[in-house]
C-alpha cells in the first residue's frame, strides 16, 4: 500500500498534480473537445479522490468519523491555503465556510480556471465517500465557481434502523 506523504500540504500537492494534468488536458481538448476532456478529468480525479479517502481511512487508529475528519483539515489548510469560518463542529456535524481559497487562485493563475472545480472541489464529496461512507457532504456554492464563499456541510448519516 502507498504511503501518504504528510510533509507537504494539499495545496502544494494540487499544484504539482495540475502541472502534470495541464498538458494532458490541453491535448484532450485538442483531440476530443472541451466537454469530453472535462469528463475524462472528472472521472480520473473522482476515482483518485475515493482512493485517497480510503487510504486515509486505513491509517486511522479507530473507525473514521467526523472528529477524525476534522483533524485532517490541517492538510488542506496548510500554507495558508484556506480562510475558513467554522459554524459547527461536533461528533455528528462539521459545518464551515471558506471565504478565501488559494486553490482557486492557483488554478486561475495556471490557466486552469475552467477545470479548477474538477481538480479540487469535485474531490470533496468523493473523498469523504472513500474515507467515511457514513458521512455525507453538501455544498451549494464554491469560490472556485465565483461565489463569495464555499458552504461545506458534513453530517453523519442517520441510522436507518
Image (cartoon, grey):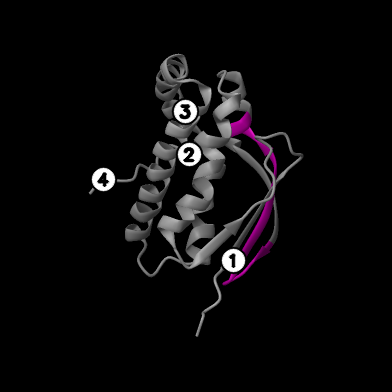
Q: Earlier in the sequence, mark 1 or mark 4?
A: 4
Distance between the Cα atoms at labels 4 and 3? 30 Å
Q: Is residue 73 left or right of residue 89?
A: left
**Quadrant of the rendered structure where residue 102 is?**
top right
Q: Which residue is mark 2?
A: 10
The residue indicated by pointer 3 is 36
What label sits on residue 2 in the rendered view? 4
How would you rate the neighbour count of disc 3 (Cα within 10 Å): few for under 14, some for 14-19, many for 20 or more?
Answer: few
Give the structural element (helix, strand or loop) at label 4: loop
* Position of residue 55 in the picture relative to residue 65 (left or right): left
Mark 2: give few (<14), some (14-19) or many (20+) Cα within 10 Å: many
The image shows residue 93 at horizontal and vertical percentages of: 61, 67
Q: Looking at the picture, how far across and down is residue 91, in whole percent?
A: 57, 72
Q: Taking 138 as reference, is 13 above or below it?
A: above
Q: Secondary structure at mark 2?
A: helix
Is 97 left, or right, of 135 in this rendering? right
Callout 3 secondary element: helix
Looking at the picture, how far across and down is residue 132, in whole percent? 44, 63
Position above or below: 105 against 3: above
Q: First in sequence: mark 3 or mark 2?
A: 2
Point out the frontmost of discs 1 and 4. Answer: 1
The residue depicted at 55 percent of the width and 69 percent of the height is 156
Q: Which residue is mark 1?
A: 155
Q: Is residue 89 magenta?
A: yes
- Which dot, 3 or 2, sits closer to the camera? 3
- 157 up-or-down from 153: above or below: below
Q: CA distance from mark 3 to mark 2?
A: 27 Å
Q: Residues within 10 Å of mark 4 (few under 14, many from 20)?
A: few
Q: Nearer the viewer, mark 3 or mark 1?
A: 3
Amino acid at each position: 500500500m502507498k504511503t501518504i506523504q504528510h510533509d507537504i500540504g494539499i495545496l502544494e500537492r494540487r499544484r504539482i498534480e495540475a502541472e502534470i494534468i495541464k498538458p494532458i488536458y490541453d491535448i484532450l481538448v485538442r483531440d476530443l473537445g472541451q466537454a469530453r476532456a472535462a469528463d475524462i478529468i472528472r472521472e480520473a480525479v473522482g476515482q483518485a479522490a475515493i482512493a485517497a479517502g480510503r487510504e486515509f481511512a486505513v491509517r486511522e487508529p479507530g473507525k473514521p468519523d467526523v472528529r477524525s475528519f476534522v483533524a485532517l483539515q490541517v492538510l488542506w489548510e496548510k500554507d495558508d491555503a484556506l480562510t475558513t469560518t467554522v459554524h459547527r463542529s461536533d461528533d455528528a456535524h462539521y459545518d464551515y465556510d471558506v471565504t478565501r481559497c488559494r486553490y482557486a487562485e492557483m488554478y486561475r493563475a495556471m490557466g486552469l480556471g475552467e477545470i479548477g472545480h474538477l481538480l479540487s472541489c469535485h474531490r470533496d464529496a468523493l473523498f469523504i465517500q472513500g474515507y467515511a461512507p457514513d458521512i455525507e457532504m453538501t455544498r451549494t456554492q464554491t469560490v472556485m465557481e465565483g461565489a463569495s464563499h464555499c458552504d461545506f456541510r458534513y453530517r453523519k448519516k442517520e441510522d436507518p434502523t
